[in-house]
Amino acid sequence: MYDLVIRRAHLVDDTLIDIAIQDGRIAALGEVAGAGRQEVDLKGEHYVSAGWIDSHVHCYPKSPIYHDEPDSVGIATGVTTVVDAGSTGADDVDTFYQITRSATTDVYALLNISRVGLIAQNELADMSHIDGDAVREAVKRYPDFIVGLKARMSSSVVGENGITPLQRAKAIQKENGDLPLMVHIGNNPPNLDEIADLLTSGDIITHCYNGKPNRILTPSGELRASVSRAIQRGVRLDVGHGSASLSFAVARQAIAMGILPHTISSDIYCKNRINGPVYSLAAVMSKFLAVGLSLPQVIDCVTCHAAQGLRLDDKGSLEIGKAADLTIFELRRQPTVMLDAENDALQADEQLVALAAVRAGKWFTTEQGKAEHVFDL
Ligand SMILES: [Zn+2]
Protein backbone atom coordinates (compact mmCIF):
# COMPACT_ATOMS: atom_id res chain seq x y z
CA MET A 1 0.00 0.00 0.00
CA TYR A 2 1.29 3.46 -0.96
CA ASP A 3 1.47 6.34 1.53
CA LEU A 4 -0.45 8.68 -0.77
CA VAL A 5 -2.12 8.30 -4.16
CA ILE A 6 -3.26 11.35 -6.11
CA ARG A 7 -5.75 10.33 -8.78
CA ARG A 8 -6.79 11.94 -12.06
CA ALA A 9 -4.30 14.78 -11.83
CA HIS A 10 -4.31 17.11 -14.82
CA LEU A 11 -0.84 17.81 -16.24
CA VAL A 12 -0.09 20.97 -18.21
CA ASP A 13 0.22 18.86 -21.38
CA ASP A 14 -3.45 17.98 -20.80
CA THR A 15 -2.94 14.31 -19.91
CA LEU A 16 -4.52 12.81 -16.79
CA ILE A 17 -2.40 10.66 -14.48
CA ASP A 18 -2.33 9.07 -11.05
CA ILE A 19 0.71 9.69 -8.86
CA ALA A 20 1.64 7.23 -6.10
CA ILE A 21 4.01 8.24 -3.32
CA GLN A 22 5.96 6.06 -0.93
CA ASP A 23 8.59 7.08 1.65
CA GLY A 24 8.76 10.65 0.35
CA ARG A 25 9.45 9.64 -3.25
CA ILE A 26 7.39 9.22 -6.39
CA ALA A 27 6.75 5.46 -6.56
CA ALA A 28 4.41 5.06 -9.54
CA LEU A 29 2.95 7.21 -12.30
CA GLY A 30 0.24 6.69 -14.90
CA GLU A 31 -2.68 4.45 -14.04
CA VAL A 32 -2.00 3.33 -10.48
CA ALA A 33 -3.84 0.15 -9.47
CA GLY A 34 -2.66 -0.11 -5.86
CA ALA A 35 -4.39 1.75 -3.03
CA GLY A 36 -2.96 4.46 -0.80
CA ARG A 37 -3.36 4.98 2.93
CA GLN A 38 -4.36 8.49 1.88
CA GLU A 39 -6.04 9.15 -1.46
CA VAL A 40 -6.98 12.40 -3.16
CA ASP A 41 -9.09 12.37 -6.32
CA LEU A 42 -8.56 15.54 -8.32
CA LYS A 43 -11.17 14.39 -10.92
CA GLY A 44 -9.18 16.07 -13.68
CA GLU A 45 -10.22 19.43 -12.24
CA HIS A 46 -6.86 20.51 -10.84
CA TYR A 47 -3.42 20.75 -12.36
CA VAL A 48 -0.39 19.06 -10.85
CA SER A 49 3.26 19.74 -11.63
CA ALA A 50 6.54 18.94 -9.94
CA GLY A 51 6.83 21.10 -6.83
CA TRP A 52 7.46 24.74 -7.62
CA ILE A 53 10.97 26.02 -6.99
CA ASP A 54 11.49 29.74 -6.35
CA SER A 55 15.10 30.42 -7.39
CA HIS A 56 15.35 33.83 -5.72
CA VAL A 57 13.74 34.64 -2.37
CA HIS A 58 14.78 36.31 0.90
CA CYS A 59 13.77 34.29 3.93
CA TYR A 60 16.43 34.80 6.60
CA PRO A 61 14.15 35.96 9.42
CA LYS A 62 17.00 37.82 11.15
CA SER A 63 18.00 40.01 8.19
CA PRO A 64 17.40 43.62 9.24
CA ILE A 65 16.37 44.68 5.73
CA TYR A 66 15.01 41.81 3.59
CA HIS A 67 13.51 39.24 5.92
CA ASP A 68 10.72 36.70 5.90
CA GLU A 69 9.86 33.21 7.16
CA PRO A 70 10.71 30.29 4.86
CA ASP A 71 7.22 28.76 5.07
CA SER A 72 5.51 32.12 4.43
CA VAL A 73 7.22 32.41 1.03
CA GLY A 74 7.22 28.63 0.50
CA ILE A 75 4.72 25.96 1.40
CA ALA A 76 1.94 28.40 2.43
CA THR A 77 1.80 29.49 -1.21
CA GLY A 78 2.35 26.10 -2.84
CA VAL A 79 6.11 26.55 -3.33
CA THR A 80 7.92 23.42 -2.12
CA THR A 81 11.51 24.66 -2.53
CA VAL A 82 12.97 28.13 -2.06
CA VAL A 83 16.48 29.35 -2.73
CA ASP A 84 17.52 32.28 -0.60
CA ALA A 85 19.61 34.56 -2.79
CA GLY A 86 22.39 35.98 -0.66
CA SER A 87 20.61 37.09 2.51
CA THR A 88 23.47 35.53 4.42
CA GLY A 89 27.20 35.38 3.93
CA ALA A 90 29.72 33.26 5.80
CA ASP A 91 29.07 35.07 9.11
CA ASP A 92 25.35 34.24 9.38
CA VAL A 93 24.89 31.12 7.30
CA ASP A 94 25.13 28.82 10.35
CA THR A 95 22.23 30.58 12.07
CA PHE A 96 20.23 30.58 8.85
CA TYR A 97 20.86 26.87 8.31
CA GLN A 98 19.64 26.06 11.83
CA ILE A 99 16.45 28.10 11.36
CA THR A 100 15.63 26.35 8.09
CA ARG A 101 15.81 22.87 9.66
CA SER A 102 12.38 23.35 11.24
CA ALA A 103 10.74 24.63 8.03
CA THR A 104 8.39 22.46 6.00
CA THR A 105 9.61 24.16 2.83
CA ASP A 106 12.90 22.82 1.46
CA VAL A 107 15.32 25.74 1.77
CA TYR A 108 18.69 26.26 0.04
CA ALA A 109 21.07 29.19 0.01
CA LEU A 110 23.13 31.12 -2.49
CA LEU A 111 25.90 32.37 -0.22
CA ASN A 112 26.59 36.08 -0.44
CA ILE A 113 30.25 36.56 -1.38
CA SER A 114 30.25 39.31 1.25
CA ARG A 115 30.70 37.65 4.61
CA VAL A 116 28.22 40.07 6.22
CA GLY A 117 25.35 39.29 3.80
CA LEU A 118 22.34 41.58 3.72
CA ILE A 119 22.79 43.42 6.98
CA ALA A 120 22.88 46.64 4.94
CA GLN A 121 22.28 47.67 1.33
CA ASN A 122 25.98 47.99 0.50
CA GLU A 123 27.52 44.67 1.46
CA LEU A 124 30.15 44.88 -1.34
CA ALA A 125 31.24 48.49 -0.72
CA ASP A 126 34.01 47.29 1.62
CA MET A 127 36.30 44.84 -0.20
CA SER A 128 37.52 43.41 3.10
CA HIS A 129 34.07 41.79 3.47
CA ILE A 130 34.83 39.55 0.49
CA ASP A 131 36.72 36.77 2.23
CA GLY A 132 37.49 33.76 0.04
CA ASP A 133 38.60 31.62 2.99
CA ALA A 134 35.36 32.29 4.86
CA VAL A 135 33.33 31.32 1.77
CA ARG A 136 35.31 28.10 1.32
CA GLU A 137 34.84 27.11 4.97
CA ALA A 138 31.09 27.83 4.80
CA VAL A 139 30.65 25.79 1.60
CA LYS A 140 32.57 22.95 3.29
CA ARG A 141 30.30 23.09 6.36
CA TYR A 142 27.05 23.04 4.32
CA PRO A 143 27.69 21.33 0.97
CA ASP A 144 24.04 20.26 0.67
CA PHE A 145 22.59 23.63 1.71
CA ILE A 146 24.76 26.15 -0.15
CA VAL A 147 23.95 25.50 -3.82
CA GLY A 148 25.69 28.56 -5.25
CA LEU A 149 27.02 32.07 -4.74
CA LYS A 150 25.42 35.50 -4.97
CA ALA A 151 26.97 38.83 -5.95
CA ARG A 152 24.84 41.98 -6.10
CA MET A 153 26.42 44.15 -8.78
CA SER A 154 24.72 47.52 -8.68
CA SER A 155 26.00 50.93 -7.69
CA SER A 156 24.21 51.11 -4.33
CA VAL A 157 25.74 47.76 -3.32
CA VAL A 158 29.33 48.04 -4.60
CA GLY A 159 29.92 51.72 -3.80
CA GLU A 160 33.24 52.81 -5.34
CA ASN A 161 34.35 49.27 -6.18
CA GLY A 162 32.93 49.01 -9.70
CA ILE A 163 33.45 45.60 -11.31
CA THR A 164 36.08 44.40 -8.79
CA PRO A 165 33.66 42.43 -6.54
CA LEU A 166 32.54 40.39 -9.56
CA GLN A 167 36.15 39.59 -10.50
CA ARG A 168 36.61 38.32 -6.93
CA ALA A 169 33.34 36.37 -7.14
CA LYS A 170 34.51 34.57 -10.29
CA ALA A 171 37.81 33.63 -8.59
CA ILE A 172 35.95 32.38 -5.49
CA GLN A 173 33.58 30.41 -7.71
CA LYS A 174 36.59 28.61 -9.26
CA GLU A 175 37.91 27.69 -5.82
CA ASN A 176 34.55 26.16 -4.91
CA GLY A 177 33.89 23.64 -7.65
CA ASP A 178 32.31 26.10 -10.08
CA LEU A 179 29.14 26.54 -8.03
CA PRO A 180 26.43 28.47 -9.89
CA LEU A 181 26.90 32.23 -9.42
CA MET A 182 23.81 34.44 -9.38
CA VAL A 183 24.53 38.06 -10.26
CA HIS A 184 22.04 40.81 -9.48
CA ILE A 185 21.99 43.63 -12.04
CA GLY A 186 20.62 47.13 -11.45
CA ASN A 187 21.91 50.67 -11.64
CA ASN A 188 25.42 51.34 -12.94
CA PRO A 189 28.31 51.50 -12.32
CA PRO A 190 29.29 48.82 -13.02
CA ASN A 191 27.99 48.84 -16.55
CA LEU A 192 26.01 45.76 -17.59
CA ASP A 193 28.43 45.11 -20.49
CA GLU A 194 31.33 44.75 -18.05
CA ILE A 195 29.26 42.34 -15.94
CA ALA A 196 27.98 40.25 -18.85
CA ASP A 197 31.46 39.86 -20.35
CA LEU A 198 32.75 38.23 -17.15
CA LEU A 199 29.97 35.63 -16.88
CA THR A 200 30.38 32.04 -18.03
CA SER A 201 28.16 29.03 -18.65
CA GLY A 202 25.80 28.31 -15.76
CA ASP A 203 26.04 31.79 -14.23
CA ILE A 204 22.66 33.41 -13.63
CA ILE A 205 21.66 37.03 -14.31
CA THR A 206 18.82 37.91 -11.94
CA HIS A 207 16.48 40.90 -12.40
CA CYS A 208 16.88 40.16 -16.11
CA TYR A 209 13.87 42.27 -17.19
CA ASN A 210 14.44 45.25 -14.90
CA GLY A 211 13.53 48.63 -16.37
CA LYS A 212 16.53 50.64 -15.15
CA PRO A 213 18.79 52.41 -17.69
CA ASN A 214 21.48 49.70 -17.25
CA ARG A 215 19.07 47.01 -18.54
CA ILE A 216 19.46 44.23 -21.12
CA LEU A 217 17.83 46.23 -23.95
CA THR A 218 19.48 49.24 -25.58
CA PRO A 219 17.57 52.55 -25.82
CA SER A 220 16.59 51.55 -29.37
CA GLY A 221 15.15 48.29 -28.06
CA GLU A 222 17.78 45.79 -29.18
CA LEU A 223 19.39 43.20 -26.97
CA ARG A 224 22.82 44.38 -25.82
CA ALA A 225 25.53 42.54 -27.74
CA SER A 226 27.29 41.66 -24.47
CA VAL A 227 24.14 39.99 -23.11
CA SER A 228 23.54 38.19 -26.39
CA ARG A 229 27.10 36.77 -26.25
CA ALA A 230 26.61 35.80 -22.60
CA ILE A 231 23.41 33.89 -23.43
CA GLN A 232 25.26 32.13 -26.26
CA ARG A 233 27.90 31.04 -23.74
CA GLY A 234 25.20 29.47 -21.52
CA VAL A 235 24.49 32.29 -19.07
CA ARG A 236 20.97 31.94 -17.70
CA LEU A 237 18.28 34.59 -17.20
CA ASP A 238 16.27 34.75 -13.97
CA VAL A 239 13.31 37.07 -13.43
CA GLY A 240 13.78 38.10 -9.75
CA HIS A 241 10.72 40.39 -9.79
CA GLY A 242 11.24 42.10 -6.42
CA SER A 243 10.18 45.58 -5.46
CA ALA A 244 12.16 47.33 -8.22
CA SER A 245 13.21 44.84 -10.87
CA LEU A 246 10.47 43.89 -13.33
CA SER A 247 9.30 46.01 -16.24
CA PHE A 248 6.43 44.57 -18.29
CA ALA A 249 7.63 46.63 -21.27
CA VAL A 250 11.15 45.15 -21.12
CA ALA A 251 9.84 41.61 -20.54
CA ARG A 252 7.34 41.82 -23.36
CA GLN A 253 9.85 43.23 -25.81
CA ALA A 254 12.58 40.74 -24.86
CA ILE A 255 10.24 37.75 -25.00
CA ALA A 256 8.96 38.87 -28.41
CA MET A 257 12.60 38.74 -29.58
CA GLY A 258 12.96 35.21 -28.17
CA ILE A 259 14.90 36.27 -25.05
CA LEU A 260 13.00 33.97 -22.70
CA PRO A 261 13.64 33.57 -18.96
CA HIS A 262 15.23 30.31 -17.87
CA THR A 263 13.67 30.73 -14.43
CA ILE A 264 10.79 32.77 -13.04
CA SER A 265 11.48 33.82 -9.48
CA SER A 266 9.92 36.27 -7.08
CA ASP A 267 12.70 38.01 -5.05
CA ILE A 268 10.01 37.99 -2.37
CA TYR A 269 10.33 39.13 1.24
CA CYS A 270 7.74 40.22 3.77
CA LYS A 271 7.17 43.76 2.46
CA ASN A 272 6.73 43.03 -1.24
CA ARG A 273 4.79 39.86 -0.32
CA ILE A 274 2.24 41.69 1.84
CA ASN A 275 2.05 45.07 0.03
CA GLY A 276 2.98 43.97 -3.49
CA PRO A 277 3.95 44.18 -6.21
CA VAL A 278 5.22 40.59 -5.80
CA TYR A 279 2.62 38.91 -3.51
CA SER A 280 3.63 35.32 -4.37
CA LEU A 281 5.45 33.19 -6.93
CA ALA A 282 2.03 32.27 -8.41
CA ALA A 283 1.30 35.98 -8.95
CA VAL A 284 4.65 36.47 -10.71
CA MET A 285 3.98 33.40 -12.87
CA SER A 286 0.55 34.84 -13.77
CA LYS A 287 2.26 38.02 -14.97
CA PHE A 288 4.38 35.98 -17.36
CA LEU A 289 1.28 34.26 -18.73
CA ALA A 290 -0.12 37.73 -19.37
CA VAL A 291 3.12 38.87 -21.00
CA GLY A 292 2.89 36.01 -23.48
CA LEU A 293 4.43 32.78 -22.20
CA SER A 294 2.39 29.57 -22.40
CA LEU A 295 1.37 27.63 -19.29
CA PRO A 296 3.90 24.81 -19.98
CA GLN A 297 6.66 27.43 -20.46
CA VAL A 298 5.80 29.12 -17.17
CA ILE A 299 5.71 25.81 -15.29
CA ASP A 300 9.05 24.71 -16.77
CA CYS A 301 10.59 27.93 -15.40
CA VAL A 302 9.72 26.97 -11.81
CA THR A 303 10.32 23.21 -12.10
CA CYS A 304 12.80 21.57 -14.49
CA HIS A 305 14.67 24.75 -15.45
CA ALA A 306 15.03 25.84 -11.83
CA ALA A 307 16.24 22.40 -10.75
CA GLN A 308 18.72 22.31 -13.61
CA GLY A 309 20.09 25.81 -12.97
CA LEU A 310 20.74 25.14 -9.29
CA ARG A 311 21.69 21.47 -9.68
CA LEU A 312 18.79 20.19 -7.56
CA ASP A 313 18.93 16.81 -9.29
CA ASP A 314 16.30 15.21 -7.10
CA LYS A 315 13.65 17.76 -8.07
CA GLY A 316 11.92 19.51 -10.94
CA SER A 317 10.19 16.68 -12.76
CA LEU A 318 7.60 13.98 -12.24
CA GLU A 319 9.70 10.83 -12.43
CA ILE A 320 9.70 7.62 -10.45
CA GLY A 321 12.35 7.83 -7.74
CA LYS A 322 12.45 11.62 -7.54
CA ALA A 323 11.45 13.58 -4.43
CA ALA A 324 7.69 13.59 -3.93
CA ASP A 325 7.37 17.38 -4.15
CA LEU A 326 4.27 18.47 -6.07
CA THR A 327 2.20 21.60 -6.53
CA ILE A 328 -1.56 21.38 -7.11
CA PHE A 329 -3.00 24.47 -8.78
CA GLU A 330 -5.67 25.99 -10.99
CA LEU A 331 -5.69 28.42 -13.86
CA ARG A 332 -8.69 30.63 -13.16
CA ARG A 333 -10.49 32.93 -15.50
CA GLN A 334 -10.25 35.98 -13.30
CA PRO A 335 -9.64 39.33 -14.99
CA THR A 336 -7.14 41.24 -12.87
CA VAL A 337 -5.05 44.39 -13.23
CA MET A 338 -1.47 43.60 -12.27
CA LEU A 339 1.39 46.01 -11.62
CA ASP A 340 5.08 45.63 -12.37
CA ALA A 341 7.87 47.21 -10.33
CA GLU A 342 7.61 50.39 -12.45
CA ASN A 343 3.95 50.79 -11.46
CA ASP A 344 2.85 50.02 -15.02
CA ALA A 345 -0.41 48.11 -15.26
CA LEU A 346 -1.27 45.04 -17.30
CA GLN A 347 -4.71 43.52 -17.71
CA ALA A 348 -4.56 39.75 -17.21
CA ASP A 349 -7.43 37.38 -17.97
CA GLU A 350 -6.17 34.38 -16.03
CA GLN A 351 -4.59 33.80 -12.66
CA LEU A 352 -2.61 30.85 -11.37
CA VAL A 353 -3.82 29.81 -7.94
CA ALA A 354 -1.84 27.32 -5.85
CA LEU A 355 -4.25 25.19 -3.81
CA ALA A 356 -2.04 22.56 -2.21
CA ALA A 357 1.42 21.06 -2.26
CA VAL A 358 3.04 17.77 -1.46
CA ARG A 359 6.43 18.17 0.19
CA ALA A 360 8.57 15.04 0.70
CA GLY A 361 5.40 12.96 0.39
CA LYS A 362 3.23 14.92 2.81
CA TRP A 363 0.12 16.85 1.78
CA PHE A 364 -0.24 20.54 2.68
CA THR A 365 -3.22 22.68 1.71
CA THR A 366 -2.20 26.28 0.95
CA GLU A 367 -3.73 29.30 2.71
CA GLN A 368 -5.85 29.89 -0.36
CA GLY A 369 -6.91 26.24 -0.57
CA LYS A 370 -7.87 26.30 3.11
CA ALA A 371 -9.86 29.51 2.73
CA GLU A 372 -11.81 27.96 -0.15
CA HIS A 373 -12.23 24.51 1.42
CA VAL A 374 -11.17 22.89 -1.83
CA PHE A 375 -9.83 19.74 -0.19
CA ASP A 376 -11.23 18.04 2.88
CA LEU A 377 -7.98 16.65 4.24
ZN1 LIG B 1 17.08 39.54 -4.05
Image (tube, grey):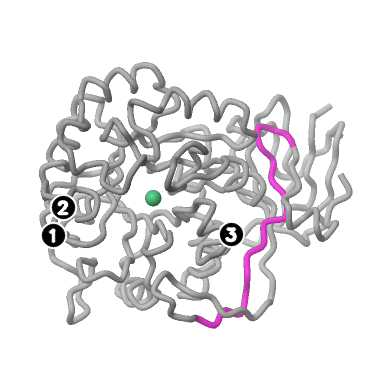
Q: Which residue is mark 1?
A: 191
Side (left or right) of 218 relative to 369: left
The residue at 50%/51% (across/down) is 269
How far is disc 3 from disc 2 in space, using C-alphas? Answer: 32 Å
Q: Secondary structure at mark 2?
A: helix
Magenta highlight: main SS: strand
Q: Which residue is mark 2?
A: 195
Side (left or right) of 147 relative to 9: left
Side (left or right) of 49 relative to 285: right
Question: Do callouts 2 and 1 mark residues in contact (Cβ within 8 Å)?
Answer: yes
Which disc, if any, is residue 114? Answer: none
Looking at the picture, does residue 284 appear above or below residue 165?
below
Q: Which residues are magenta?
A: 346-362
Q: Quadrant of residue 186?
A: bottom left
Amino acid found under the numbered disc labelled 1? Asn
Q: Nearer the viewer, residue 11 or 308?
A: 308
Looking at the picture, does residue 324 appear above or below residue 198?
above
The residue at 40%/56% (across/down) is 240
Which image quarter holds the C terminus?
top right
Q: Nearer the viewer, residue 85 or 8?
A: 85
Q: Nearer the viewer, residue 165 or 330?
A: 165
Q: Nearer the viewer, mark 1 or mark 3?
A: 3
